[in-house]
Image: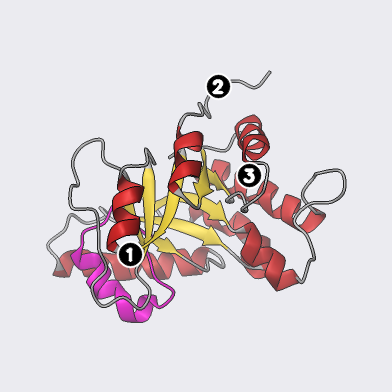
Amino acid sequence: MRAVLIVPGEAQAVAAASASGAHALIVDVTGLASPVLPSERTEGAPLLYLRSHDLERDLPAMMAAAPHGIVLPRCEGARDVMELGARLAVGEAIQSLRDGATRILALVTTARGALVLPTLADSSDRLDGIAWDARALRTEIGASAFRGRDGALIPPLAETRALVRLAATAAGVDAIDSACEPGGDLAGEIEEASRDGFAGKLVLDPVQARIVAMTDFTAPSG
């Protein structure tokens, strides 16, 4: 999963995302009675992950779409992953899906989530990857900037990023780097992600997706 594109569940946005070259889509269905999902789920199409900030309400409808996976939008440890896994098992049975077919992409957005990242190593066989959201974490801790004058991430964000990378390795899943903010140095962040062993990067628009998708994250860094 190199380019993981976050997109609202609206027709125009989903159509553009599907044609962007992204390897996976995170379609946000929060509050949408009838979200628009990619019409073609053929081999080579982007993997489909669904996200809602109200899983209690929306998960049954999300499971009816038989996505590749569900995003755990505020992951705060192994218990959260295991609880979602149990709910997915029930949903698969109801929808006559193969047991274990629905994967989990854990998204770390809080300080608590960062501090308990090591617990994800043995949380669930459904765990597909661990990603993190620098914007959400920066907002929670009240930081005024993402990076210092030297261009490096401020310490709390840098530490979280490192923990995501280590936790993903321990769990044997993909580590997905945070999205580049508008106006940020996308090329520099892609280079950092590749250098540090991330499998891919969250992206916020189709243009970013095309650029990230061309990166070979498995290539050794010079």
Quick check: is 41 in the magenta stretch?
no
Question: In front: 13, or 199?
Answer: 13
Quick check: is 53 in the magenta stretch?
yes
Type of amino acid at the residue the image marks with label 1: Gly
| Left or right, residue 108 beside residue 162 | left
Q: Give the number of the disc on residue 9.
A: 1
Q: Quadrant of residue 96?
A: bottom left
According to the picture, the residue beneath numbered tag 2 turns out to be 219
Q: Quadrant of residue 21?
A: top left
Q: Which of marks 3 and 2 is in front?
A: 2
What residue lies at 43% left-to-right and 50% top-to-bottom?
5
User: Where does residue 177 sit, x and y in percent of width and height?
Assistant: 58, 46
Q: Quadrant of residue 210?
A: top left
Task: State the separation of the CA atoms marked 2 and 1.
Answer: 33 Å
Q: Which of marks 3 and 1 is in front?
A: 1
Q: Is residue 35 above or below residue 197?
A: below
The boundaries of the magenta stretch are 51-70
Type of amino acid at the residue the image marks with label 2: Ala
Type of amino acid at the residue the image marks with label 3: Leu
Q: Give the number of the disc on residue 166.
A: 3
